[in-house]
Every structure is written in structure tokens, then in C-alpha cells.
Amino acid sequence: MNYRIDNLQYCKWSRKIFEINREAGLDAVHVTIVYHEDFDELLLEIKKWDKLFKENSDLIFLGGNHEDIEKAQLEKKTAIFFGFQNCSPIEDDINLVEKVHELGCRFMQLTYNNQSLLATGCYEKVDSGVTNFGRETIKEMNKVGIVVDMSHSAEKSTFDAIEISEKPIAITHANPAFWHPAKRNKSNDLLKTLGDSGGMLGLSLYPHHLKNNTNCDLDSFCEMIARTAEIMNLKNIGIGSDLCIEQPDSVVEWMRNGTWSKSKNYGEGSKNRPGFPKQPDWFKDARGFQNLENGLKKIGFSEDETNGILGNNWFNFYKNI
Amino acid sequence: MNYRIDNLQYCKWSRKIFEINREAGLDAVHVTIVYHEDFDELLLEIKKWDKLFKENSDLIFLGGNHEDIEKAQLEKKTAIFFGFQNCSPIEDDINLVEKVHELGCRFMQLTYNNQSLLATGCYEKVDSGVTNFGRETIKEMNKVGIVVDMSHSAEKSTFDAIEISEKPIAITHANPAFWHPAKRNKSNDLLKTLGDSGGMLGLSLYPHHLKNNTNCDLDSFCEMIARTAEIMNLKNIGIGSDLCIEQPDSVVEWMRNGTWSKSKNYGEGSKNRPGFPKQPDWFKDARGFQNLENGLKKIGFSEDETNGILGNNWFNFYKNI
């Protein structure tokens, strides 16, 4: 069987978006349900998702493991896997790791741009690596079954996490820095170590991570994948589109600033372009997976390789974890 | 006027302890009201203090600035200044800095042993210094009037804090490492920089910070002060006893472990000596200030210098901040 998986979306969820994801043939989506929320605020977000699951039960359901991806394909639905982009929901309490797993969490970033209690984010000046609490938390995440996600983390912290974690980790949404040297994109050394450890890279379609931003062309993106496959095994590469469809610009401002600053931080944006950037024409939403399929085949990827990139590699990762 | 100030206590508060502090002639005490508590838990602690203030209004009242120390002396009471040993009460929200100041907070540690969102604690392997959120928070603490306390912080973080803060900072309870090389004690370089910046060192009477622990003798402690005054100006030296009178051992276990680990961390203690260490005979409680006075004079400090160390230096620090 072939699966289509987008391993990172943070859309303004609605029936319309679930329909688009189904139209795109997505069997599974890893969705970000919280950024800077604490445990109580997480519970409120989960309540909203309970309602979404109820109202759209013909399109989506909460996924817990790889069997739910198989089930989704059989039932022509999309399995939704919960993830956090920051570790704020576990607050300073190791015992909450198990709790958030019970609530459905399957991916958790140790950091979002800034320093967290667990590790350093990619926007800090100095990267001290995984902290005392971070080491304990990774052990606990391994035990209960939450994937360590280092997409927004700094480099030493990511190397540390790969070394400390007894299970492969993921960078669910980022691109290689050799192609586009953004702060959020990753070095060859890191990608090689990630791949060697069995970890996954989810390639991002978020314009700030793309060469030429919104004007990035499909061929360039697909060629980047071919070159990345020379650094890490192709089987460790998937898609994590980072689609933020229909989110207002206030959301990206909140992502970047949370409540940690009284001045305004523009993150990957700038004062003149503070909002969400426009998606490339060939990936306006998940239906762009069809363009990716065409593009990958065009530059010479086989049927199997293409299916691997577009979902089977993530499926195997879910299966092995 | 001469003032007696103990700039750090975390006792199991009761009328008995307030009486002891009065008997010791303390005009002001900086008390730790929270360690790992979040904002809501802080409010509960403040409720407990409201009750203590009501029930012991003949002995104590909440202090806000140096004038309350003068008032305390006139009224033969002890002004209580609130402080936090960790930054957890402001959670991840810069706006809570002003709120906690309104609630009475006048000192806040940026870290307690481990990495926090603001800086690195002295028990971490790597010290990345003050973080993005930390820089914003120091600015805000300067603005509203909360002293940055780096007693439990790592060295680079402390140098950073001194540099970033527009107002002098404090190390409310620690000793020089040259005398007793504990993790919590401070290097000569750091003490010199602290003093040069107008910052205060509160010398600790907590046995783990003392040469020979519980068996430390008074002469050795007083000689240490004389040697410290060769590194930093005597006017920047005071007392922060770190007295934890009548606290059960479960409290020190909680201080060290909070909720960040499933295994047990012994901090400054050890598996065989996990609890609170016994105080030296000459400083069982704040009445030991009298022994300190005798000891300081005995090794040659003048009346003025002795009064400076035992309270006037802290008073001037409060006055200038």
C-alpha cells in the first residue's frame, strides 16, 4: 500500500480544510495543536478538537499509531496526529509527559525558537544543548511514545537530542541549509547524523524555508530533495509542509512573540513583511502533493522512491516507533 | 541609624520565628515565598502570608522599599520583603513581571540550579547565559523595581545579568568559592565584577556553603569576610543567611527536584545526607547576628564596617534601587 502523509500542518481548521486534505489523498496529517499554551490551555484546545472530530467524523479521526493510518486509508478518511511546537504544555512537570500522551500527543518540539526548559531554540545567541530537565523528558517521551521533534531547535541541542534519545527523532518541518541558508534550515552534518540515527526529515513548503521564497519553483524543490538524498538515506525523507492555511497574520505574530517580549519580533519575516508569506503556486494547499509527485518523477525518482517521500517513509517511521 | 537585615530566609514561618527575628533585632528580612510555583500557586502562597501578616501584625508587615525598613525600626517590627528563588511565577509572560511586583515581589532569581526560560542554573552542564526572554525580563524587572538575584545561577549567566541589567543586581545568598569551592559559591572574578557594578553579595550561613559545613567556626567565617573585602568593596557585602528553620527534609528534597525528574537529585547533599544540614552552633537562627557582630569586631572590623555588613549595606542598596 502507498500512503500520503503530511507531517506538519497548522491550518485554521475547518471542514473545508479537511476536505482539501482528503482531496489531496492524505491518509494522515500531524497537526500542531499548541505553540505556547500551558497544560490548562492545551485542554481547551483539545476540547475544540473533540468538536471538530464530532462534526467531521466522515473526514477525520484522532490517530494514535500507524494502524490508524491503514484504517484511514480503508475508510477514506484522514488520521489526525496531535503535536506540540513547544514544550510549554508539560510546564515544569515530568509527570505531564505521560498525561499529554494519554491526551493524544505524538510529537513534541523541545523548543520553539527560544530557550525552553528542555533545550535551546534556533533564535538564541548561544546554544547550551539539552538541559537536565530535557534529558529526563526525552527518556520519558521515549518511554510513553512521543516523538522528539527538533524543527525549531538550535544545532547542538539537536545533536544532543539525537544522542540522548533511545528512539529516532524527527525534524518534522525544515529544509537543508545548503539549498536555502535560513536559520530554521539544517546543516549537512546534522542531516547526515539524523538520517544515520533513523530519524526523519519532513521537508517544508513554508516560503521562508524555500529558495526564492514564494517564487521557489517546483523543479528547484525536487532537485533539492535529490541532493538531500545524497546526504541522508532517501528513506528518512518525507514531507512536513508547515501549511498554515487561512490563519490570520495575528497568528504568526503570536507564534513568534508569544508573551515573552514587549517589543515586536519578526522572526523569519521582517518589519515590511510581518505576516504569513504567500505559498508558491504549485503548493497552495495539500493538493500540491500531486504537483510534487509529478515533479519528483520528472527529475528521475522511481515510483517507489516518490511514494516513499510522499508518505510511505513517514508511515514506516510511525510503524517502527 | 544602624539597621540589621538578613537578606534571605526560607523558614517554616510561624510566630515563633518572627519573634526570634525580632529578638535578633532584624529590621528587615528578604523572605523566599516561592521556589518552583507558577503564578496561580504564588497567589496561594500570598494568601498564606496575608494571614501571617494579620495574625502577627505586632511583629511583621510587608515591606515595599527602604522607608519600610526605617519604619520597622521605629515600630520595633520586621519588614518582610518578598522574593522568588525561581522565575516560574512569571511563567512565559513578560506582563507578569509587573503583576508580581504589585503583589510585593522585590527580588527574583533568574534560575534555581537548572536551566530556566531566562538563564542557566549552576547545576547545568553548559551555561548559555541570559536568553532572549531573559534579556526582556531583566529590562522589565529594572523598570518595575525587582532586583535580579543570581544566587543559584551559573557563572556566564551571572556575568550576562550584571552587564544587561541597568540597575545593580544581587547575589543574595552565596559565599566566595576561594573559601569553600561549592558549586553554589562564586569566583573571585565574578565577585569583583559584581562589586564594581554596585551589586551586593549576601553571605550565606547555610552549612553546604560553609568551609567545614556544620563545623565551620566563626573566626573562619569572619576571616573569609575580610578576604572577600579585598576582592570587592566591603560596602557591597551583607548577610543572606539562607536560614531554613524548622523546614522538614521533604522541603529540601522538593527544592532540589521540583517536578523535573523521576529519579532523585541530591543537589548539595548526598544519598547518605539527603536532608537539611545542621546549622553551626554560633548561627542556629538569626540571633547568631550577635555572634557575627562579636566575631567581626574581634578580627578588627570597625563599628561602622560591622554595622555595614550586618545591615546598613543592604539598607543602602535598597535605598539606591
Image (cartoon, coloured by chain):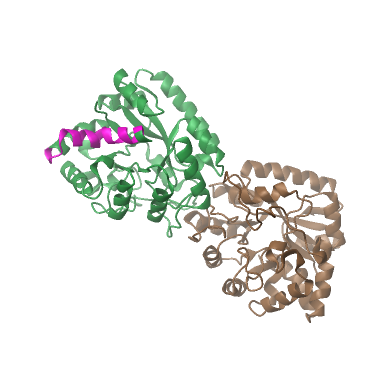
Chain colours: A brown, B green
Picture quadrant of residue B18 = top left
Residue B162, magenta (yes or no): no
Q: Residue at x 69, y 51 (%)?
A: A252
Q: Is B310 located above or below residue A264 in the figure?
A: above
Q: Residue at x 52, y 35 (%)?
A: B98
Q: Residue at x 34, y 46 (%)?
A: B197
Q: Is A104 located above or below residue A232 in the figure?
A: above
Q: Residue furthest bottom?
A: A300
Question: From the viewer's perspective, is B36 left or right of A9?
Answer: left
Using the rendered image of the protein, determine whether residue B19 is visible from the camera's viewpoint.
yes
Nearer to us in this view, A161 or B67 = B67
Q: Main secondary structure of the magenta part?
A: helix
Q: Give the magenta range.
A: B298-319
Q: Quadrant of the C terminus of chain B?
A: top left
- Residue B253: where, in percent of width, then height? 41, 44
Nearer to us in this view, B251 or B222 = B222
- Residue B50: where, in percent of width, then height? 46, 24
Residue B303, magenta (yes or no): yes
Q: Is B225 located above or below residue B311 in the figure?
A: below
Q: Quadrant of the N terminus of chain B?
A: top left
